[in-house]
Image (cartoon, rainbow, N blue to C red):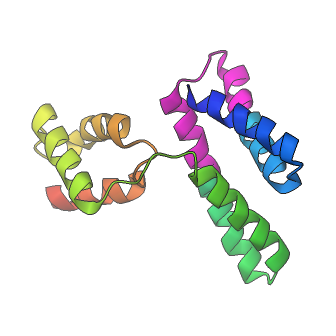
Amino acid sequence: MSLRDRIQEDMKTAMRARDKDRLGAIRLILAAIKQREVDERITLSDVQTLAVLEKMIKQRRESLTQYQNAGRADLATQEAFEIDLIQSYLPAPLDDAGIEALIAEAIAATNAQSVRDMGKVMAIIKEQAQGRADMAAVSARIKARFGG
């Protein structure tokens, strides 16, 4: 079962359970997936769907911070709920050792020597760590390894 199919099944379950909050959040997820499919005229793979979900989480984290700073606990609670729901569709996150192993494998595979080769390394890691690691943190680790 693809990730999108799983999300659609969860939507049906939420409808049957009359869980308005969960249903609304799942509909937002499906709308974002559908929007990207329409924009690019493709059917998203699971990896591309994970990219959409990561983007949604990033947006909600930024909103959460803004709502908390503005003293809007009601909106902050809704954003936190959506973050938790979206994260439930992501694969289990990689630990530090797993990330370091991926970086070492990618550097060896690309024969990377400096920060200039970082794009090649990130391309390989992104395929394997999509949805399982914060790519900004991975990028920072690669830069540190190259001394940049």
Location of residue 29 with respect to 57 vertically, above or below: above
User: Looking at the image, can residue 96 be seen?
Assistant: yes
Whether residue 53 appears in magenta in the rendering, the answer is yes
* Prevailing SS of the magenta stretch: helix
Q: Residue at x 57, y 32 (%)?
A: 3
Location of residue 98 with respect to 125 vertically, above or below: below
| Nearer-the-camera pick, 15 or 86 | 15
Q: Residue 37 vs residue 91: left or right?
A: right
Quarter occupied by residue 117? top left
User: Looking at the image, can residue 111 be seen?
Assistant: no
| Nearer-the-camera pick, 30 or 65 | 30
Residue 78, image x, y percentages: 78, 65
For the N terminus, the quadrant is: top right
Q: Residue 52 vs residue 134: left or right?
A: right
Residue 29, image x, y percentages: 72, 41
Q: Residue 101 vs residue 34: left or right?
A: left
Q: Residue at x 76, y 72 (%)?
A: 76
Location of residue 32 with respect to 147 vertically, above or below: above
For the C terminus, the quadrant is: bottom left
| Nearer-the-camera pick, 105 or 143 | 105
Magenta stretch, residue numbers: 33-56
Residue 49, image x, y percentages: 57, 33
Q: Residue at x 56, y 26 (%)?
A: 2
